[in-house]
Image (spheres, rainbow, N blue to C red):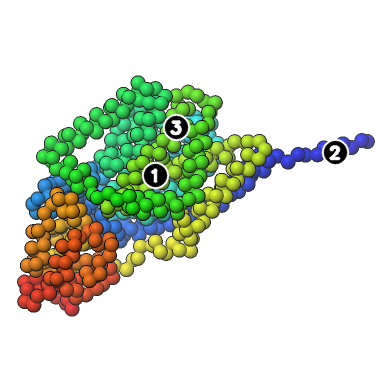
Amino acid sequence: MIRTWVKLEPDPARTSRLISLLLLTVTMTILLFITAQFFRRSVAAIRYPYELDYGEGQVLLDTLTLMNGGSIYDAPDSFPFTVSNYPPVYHVLAAALSSVTGAPLASGRALSALSTLLAGAFVGLIVMMASTRGRPTHFSPAAAAASTAAAMLFVSVWPVFIWGVFMRVDMLAILFSLAGLWAHLRWHAHPVLRHVCVALFLLAVFTRQAAVAGAASAIITTFVVDRRRGLRMGAAFCGAVIAISAVIYAATHGQFYFHTVTATATAFHWAGILVQLWYPLAQYRWLTLLAALGAIIALRSRESDTTSAGEQLRLAVPAYMVVSFLVSLTSGKVGSNINYVLELIAGACMVVGMLVGRILQERPPGWRAWMGPAAMIILLIQIVTPSLTPRLTDWWRFRIDPDTSAGDRALDRLRYAEGPVFSEDTTLLVLAGRPIEYQCYELTQLSLTGHWDQRPLLERFNRHDFALVLLRFDIADPTPLARTRFTPEMLVAIRENYRPVEKRGPYWFLVPSVPGAVGRRASPGVS
């Protein structure tokens, strides 16, 4: 008998794919843990009775105003001096939900948390569609794994993890934007359903006026494939935005424009972009690297499917990321926060998800086979370092403290003060049943741009009209954030006419410094 020995050559493609799957399994385990922590954070936020973010107070007030049949776009030259910076969709939905639950703040946070999770789901659905070329028959475990990882990655990035539970408009706007993009990719050739995406894009824009990435990417990719149809789509969307805005403008006697455009046009500083955009991009350098690499590969690739659907799937997600990056450049405005990069994060997560799907499904020859494991290692490094998320042992830093004693004390002092009160924390004013006479940040910025006269407020401080002033900083040493919420003249007026009598948690309580002033009377039990 003659035995023949056959030497088996190693298969780099097979080996690299197995390594990539192993690394992805570890990555998804960590992402699952972080997503579970987001659920816990959401429950804690819904149960927490006081302000978690400065902007929640005005959104809460707008919600209650709509529930009571009032207008949220009144002229700011008469009492109350308040500004509503956003279009009304979020407020309307929050008011409808609150009318059922009877808990406006909890309902608003529940709406935001649900929007965050659903936005993550649409991130995954779009990645799934791109990984399967939009054909359900092309479904594969690799595509499912990539889409699931992208969905959890979106929720796990710490700006989304933190912001996603606040009673703010951003996550709902991103949900509508992503849902519109998915509907566009899914039904762009359907004679009727293709119009669904335009409705969703309109909901996004009238939730947050800057949420245009979904609409812009859909219009751009449609124009690339079919110029005439792209122009029609762009005209339809822009025409609808103008028409709806004109109706609201007329109904509010022009105040809708003032609140959502004039009042939001604060001073712009390039240094603000460095803080709000460049710093996060540098911190997420590995995610940024993978997103850039994935976008380049998607734009340069020529799939076997060169149909209209194939081209749109190839271009739409990179276009979404690029447009959202351009929109995020407005973060140089005074008062901007991490919410300006949330849509960019969604785009980056989708592009990275598409890259992971390509890694798991393709088997390139030679040394290129090891590019997949290298990319997966980079993604894993990003996830387990504080650059993307805090260390797994540091989640307590982002937990919502269940101790409400400081808020309880502040609420009692505002509720029982004998006379008008001034509070930097507007949520407490709403909960105490007190009117929000002034919004600190919004009116400060309007005063600095010459759109609001601060002299009547300064006179009230000088007359000791307020029985109690509640601040979140030491008036003797204002923080940089405080200087964006109060003009120098306001800080001087408060410091010269009011003195601190108590500090509880983050709250400073001040009463008139002149003995015998009307505002000197305080609530029972005040030290």
The residue positioned farthest toward the front in the image shown: 270
Mark 1, mark 2: which one is toward the viewer?
A: 1
Q: Is residue 520 left or right of residue 6?
A: left
Tell me which numbered mark, 1 or 3, is placed earlier along the sequence.
3
Q: Is residue 515 above or below residue 12?
A: below
Marker disc for residue 5: 2
User: Tag 2's secondary structure?
Assistant: loop
Q: Is residue 188 left or right of residue 248?
A: right
What residue is shown at x 21% (from left), y 56% (from top)? 441
Q: CA distance from mark 1 to mark 2?
A: 56 Å
Q: CA distance from mark 1 to mark 3?
A: 16 Å
Tell me which numbered mark, 2 or 3, is placed earlier along the sequence.
2
Give the residue pinned by disc 3.
315
User: Tag 3's secondary structure?
Assistant: helix
Amino acid at dot 3? Leu
Local crowd at mark 2 within 10 Å, few (<14), some, or many (≥20)?
Answer: few
Amino acid at dot 1? Leu
Amino acid at dot 2? Trp
Q: Position of residue 415 (x, y in %)?
A: 15, 66
Q: Position of residue 93 (x, y in %)?
A: 25, 44
Give the residue pinned by disc 1.
344
Q: Place residue 187 in its image quadrant.
A: top left
Q: Is residue 174 above or below residue 101?
A: above
Q: CA distance from mark 2 to mark 3?
A: 50 Å
Q: Is residue 221 above or below residue 142?
A: above
The residue positioned farthest toward the top in the image shown: 228
Q: Are marks 1 and 3 in contact (CB under 8 Å)?
A: no
Question: Which quarter of the rendered picture does the C terminus lie within?
Answer: bottom left
Residue 121 seen in this snapshot: no
Q: Nearer the viewer, residue 17 or 373?
A: 373
Mark 2, mark 3: which one is toward the viewer?
A: 3
